[in-house]
Image (tube, grey):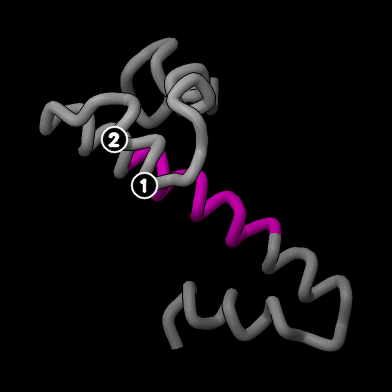
Amino acid sequence: MSDTAQLASDAGSRDPAVGLRAVRALRILVDRLEALQVENARQQGWSWQEIAHCLEVTRQAVHKKYAGGRGLLRRER
Protein backbone atom coordinates (compact mmCIF):
# COMPACT_ATOMS: atom_id res chain seq x y z
CA MET A 1 0.00 0.00 0.00
CA SER A 2 1.32 3.47 -0.81
CA ASP A 3 2.24 5.87 1.98
CA THR A 4 -0.66 8.15 1.07
CA ALA A 5 -3.16 5.29 1.05
CA GLN A 6 -1.79 4.11 4.40
CA LEU A 7 -2.19 7.62 5.85
CA ALA A 8 -5.77 7.77 4.62
CA SER A 9 -6.46 4.40 6.21
CA ASP A 10 -4.75 5.39 9.47
CA ALA A 11 -6.76 8.63 9.64
CA GLY A 12 -9.86 6.49 10.16
CA SER A 13 -8.27 4.40 12.90
CA ARG A 14 -10.16 3.81 16.14
CA ASP A 15 -6.84 4.40 17.94
CA PRO A 16 -6.64 8.18 18.50
CA ALA A 17 -2.83 8.19 18.51
CA VAL A 18 -2.71 6.53 15.08
CA GLY A 19 -5.50 8.71 13.72
CA LEU A 20 -4.08 11.99 14.97
CA ARG A 21 -0.58 11.23 13.66
CA ALA A 22 -2.12 10.47 10.27
CA VAL A 23 -4.14 13.69 10.30
CA ARG A 24 -0.97 15.67 11.06
CA ALA A 25 0.93 13.95 8.24
CA LEU A 26 -1.94 14.55 5.81
CA ARG A 27 -2.06 18.23 6.81
CA ILE A 28 1.65 18.56 5.98
CA LEU A 29 1.11 16.81 2.65
CA VAL A 30 -1.81 19.09 1.75
CA ASP A 31 0.21 22.21 2.64
CA ARG A 32 3.06 21.07 0.39
CA LEU A 33 0.72 20.21 -2.47
CA GLU A 34 -1.01 23.58 -2.17
CA ALA A 35 2.31 25.42 -2.25
CA LEU A 36 3.41 23.41 -5.28
CA GLN A 37 0.21 24.21 -7.18
CA VAL A 38 0.21 27.89 -6.21
CA GLU A 39 3.77 28.16 -7.49
CA ASN A 40 2.75 26.28 -10.65
CA ALA A 41 -0.17 28.64 -11.21
CA ARG A 42 1.96 31.75 -10.69
CA GLN A 43 4.59 30.45 -13.11
CA GLN A 44 1.82 30.05 -15.69
CA GLY A 45 0.70 33.64 -15.18
CA TRP A 46 -2.33 33.14 -12.95
CA SER A 47 -3.40 36.09 -10.84
CA TRP A 48 -3.73 35.90 -7.08
CA GLN A 49 -7.48 36.33 -7.58
CA GLU A 50 -7.69 33.27 -9.87
CA ILE A 51 -5.75 31.16 -7.38
CA ALA A 52 -7.85 32.40 -4.47
CA HIS A 53 -11.04 31.55 -6.32
CA CYS A 54 -9.91 27.94 -6.84
CA LEU A 55 -8.87 27.62 -3.20
CA GLU A 56 -12.06 29.35 -2.00
CA VAL A 57 -10.14 31.92 0.02
CA THR A 58 -9.64 35.66 -0.39
CA ARG A 59 -7.02 37.07 -2.72
CA GLN A 60 -5.42 38.73 0.30
CA ALA A 61 -5.17 35.41 2.17
CA VAL A 62 -3.41 33.56 -0.63
CA HIS A 63 -1.17 36.53 -1.39
CA LYS A 64 -0.15 36.89 2.25
CA LYS A 65 0.59 33.17 2.55
CA TYR A 66 2.68 32.82 -0.63
CA ALA A 67 3.82 36.18 -1.99
CA GLY A 68 6.48 36.93 0.63
CA GLY A 69 9.06 34.88 -1.20
CA ARG A 70 8.95 32.39 -4.00
CA GLY A 71 9.75 28.73 -3.63
CA LEU A 72 8.33 25.73 -1.84
CA LEU A 73 10.70 26.01 1.10
CA ARG A 74 9.83 29.61 2.00
CA ARG A 75 7.44 28.60 4.80
CA GLU A 76 9.72 25.86 6.20
CA ARG A 77 12.67 28.08 7.08
Q: Tell me which amino acid carries mark 2.
A: Glu
Q: Quadrant of residue 74?
A: top left
Residue underneath mark 1? 54
Residue 74 in view here: no
User: Is residue 12 located in the magenta-colored stretch of the structure?
Assistant: no
Mark 1 neighbour density, 10 Å: few (under 14) some (14–19) many (20 or more): few
Percent across and percent down for residue 57 are 51, 38
Q: Magenta residues: mostly which secondary structure?
A: helix
User: Residue at the location (42% across, 27% down)?
Assistant: 73
Q: CA distance from mark 1 to mark 2?
A: 7 Å
Of 2 and 66, which appears nearest the observer?
66
Q: Is residue 11 rendered to the left or right of residue 64?
A: right
- The segment highlighted magenta reads 24-36
Percent across and percent down for residue 49 are 33, 28
Mark 2 neighbour density, 10 Å: few (under 14) some (14–19) many (20 or more): some
Q: Quadrant of residue 2?
A: bottom left
Q: Give the answer, above or below, for where 77 lies relative to 4.
A: above
User: Residue at the location (43% across, 45% down)?
Assistant: 55
Residue 66 in view here: yes
Q: Give the answer, above or below, for where 75 lies relative to 56.
A: above
Helix, strand or loop at mark 2: helix
Percent across and percent down for residue 24 are 69, 57
Q: Give the answer, above or below, for where 60 lies relative to 18.
A: above
Percent across and percent down for residue 10 are 68, 81
Residue underneath mark 2? 50
User: Residue at the location (61% across, 54% down)?
Assistant: 27
User: Residue at the location (32% across, 41% down)?
Assistant: 36
Asked if marks 1 and 2 touch (Cβ < 8 Å), the reply is yes
User: Is residue 31 located in the magenta-colored stretch of the structure?
Assistant: yes
Helix, strand or loop at mark 1: helix
Q: Tell me which amino acid carries mark 1.
A: Cys
Q: Which quadrant is home to the N terminus? A: bottom left
